[in-house]
Amino acid sequence: MKTRAALAFEAKKPLEIVELDLEGPRAGEVLVEIKATGICHTDAYTLSGMDSEGLFPSVLGHEGAGVVVEVGAGVTSVKPGDHVIPLYTPECRQCKSCLSRKTNLCTAIRGTQGNGVMPDGASRFSYKGQTVYHYMGCSTFSNFTVLPEIAVAKVREDAPFDKICYIGCGVTTGVGAVINTAKVEPGANCIVFGLGGIGLNVIQGLRLVGADMIVGVDLNPDRKAWGERFGMTHFVNPAEVTGDLVAHLVELTGGGADYTFDATGNTTVMRQALEACHRGWGESIIIGVAEAGKEIATRPFQLVTGRVWKGTAFGGARGRTDVPKIVDWYMSGKIEIDPMITHILPLEQINEAFDLMHHGESIRSVVVF
Ligand code: NAD
Ligand code: 022
Ligand code: ZN
C-alpha cells in the first residue's frame, strides 16, 4: 500500500512529505493507521546527525496513537478497529528482562529495532524501490506504520488521539519516573531540573502521589508559570541564584531533597541533581538523555554517604500493562495533558514543530493526520 509520511532523507535536512510504499503486516505484526503524533527531542537529535546510531533515509517519530487496520498471522492481543499507542519500549512478557519484574527494558526485539528493521530483519517501508528504515520501532511520522504486536498498547476507544499520543513518550516518562522508578511516597520533598515536556509531567506525577515540596529549576523564566500550573510549589532560576545552586537547594529543602529528577539531559545538571539530594537517603533519577560520549561525575563521597543515582527509560513503564492505565488516569482527570499540547499542526507543517521545540516556544507540538 501507499502511505503519506514525513521522510528524513538525510541528517540536517528538513523532513519531506512523500508517498511511501508500505508492505502489510507479517506474522506477529500489526498495521496501524496513525491518527496523531507528538514531536519529541530524540527525533530532532537523530535528525541533527549527532546520533551515531541514526539511520537514513528513515521515518522518524515515536510518540503516536492510532487504529489497528490489519493484523498478521498469529496476532491475538489486538484486532482491526482497536485503538493503540505504539511502544518504543515493547513488552513481550517472555524474555529474561520482562520475567525478572526488575526492569521494563524488554530485549525481545532490541537488536532489530536499533537497526531500523522489523524482527525478521527487513523494513516494510520503501521509497522508489529504496529501503527506508523504521525508527525506535515506531515510525509515527507516517499515516500508516507496521509494528510488532508486542510493541502496541491497546487503549480505550473514547480517548482523543491528539492528546493520548503524548502518553507514547512524554507523559509516561515523567509520571512513570515518579511512580515506577523513584516510587515517591506522600510528603516527600522533591526537585525537578528542567520544566519542559518531560519535567512538567514529573511535576504532575509528584502532585499525584502527594509530594510535599515540589521545587522546579529552570533557566527559562517563562517556565515558572508552567510549573505552577501542574503543582510546583517553589521555583528556582539558577541564573538568579547568588552563590552555589546546590547549596541554595539544600538549604531550601531543609538538608536536601528526598528525590531529584534531571529532565534536561545536561551532565552538569545531573551532578547538581545528585548533590542536591539528602545525605543518607536522597535518590536522583536521570531522565534526560545526554549527547553521545558525555560522562557524568561526582565525588564517591556523595554515594558513600547514602545518595543514590538511578536512571529511567520510558519512566520504567511496562508498555502494554501500564500505558492503558495512564490513558484511564487522563480520562478520569487524575492527570492533565491538554494544556501541555501547545501546538497542533498538519503533517505538511511538521518542520515548524521542530523549530518551535528548538526555540523553547512549545511544550509539545502534535501533528494530526
Ligand atoms: P525540553 O527542551 O522541553 O525541556 C528541557 C528544559 O530544561 C527546558 O525548559 C530548559 O530551559 C531547561 N534547561 C536546560 N538547561 C538547563 C540548566 N542548565 N538548568 C536548568 N534548566 C535547564 O525537553 P523535554 O522534552 O522535557 O526532554 C527533556 C529530556 O528528557 C531530553 O534530554 C529528552 O531526550 C529526555 N527524555 C528521556 C526519556 C527517557 O525515557 N529517559 C524519554 C523522553 C525524553
Ligand atoms: C525518548 N527518549 C528520549 C526522548 N524520547 C528515549 C531515548 C532513549 C531511551 C529511552 C527514551 C533509552 C534508554 C535506554 C535505552 N533506550 C536502551 C534500551 C535497551 O537497550 O534495551 C533506547 C530505546 C530505544 C532505542 C534506543 C535507545 C531505539 O529504538 N533506537 C528505548
Ligand atoms: Zn520521546
Image: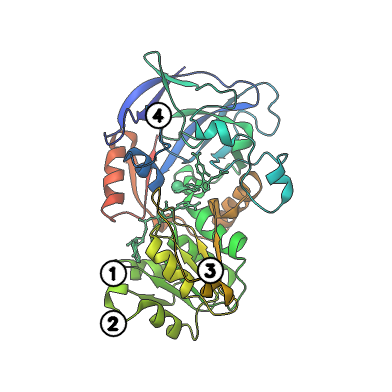
Looking at the image, tell me whether mark 3 or mark 2 is earlier in sequence order: 3
* Mark 4: few/some/many CA within 10 Å (<14, 14-19, 20+): many
Q: Secondary structure at mark 2?
A: loop
Residue corresponding to mark 2: 242
Q: Secondary structure at mark 1?
A: loop
Residue corresponding to mark 3: 206
User: How far separated are the C-alphas under marks 4 and 3?
Assistant: 36 Å
**Whether label 3 touches label 1, CB < 8 Å:** no
User: Image check: 137 left or right of 194?
Assistant: right
Task: Say the numbered circle drawn on residue 58.
Answer: 4
User: How far separated are the C-alphas under marks 1 and 2?
Assistant: 16 Å
Mark 1 is on which residue type?
Answer: Pro
Looking at the image, tell me whether mark 4 or mark 1 is earlier in sequence order: 4
Looking at the image, tell me whether mark 3 or mark 1 is earlier in sequence order: 3
Against 78, residue 284 (above or below) is below
* Camera-nearest label, 3 or 2: 2
Q: Which residue is at a point 34% across and 70% down the rendered structure image?
A: 225
User: How far separated are the C-alphas under marks 3 and 2?
Assistant: 28 Å
Mark 3 is on which residue type?
Answer: Leu
Against 180, residue 227 (above or below) is below
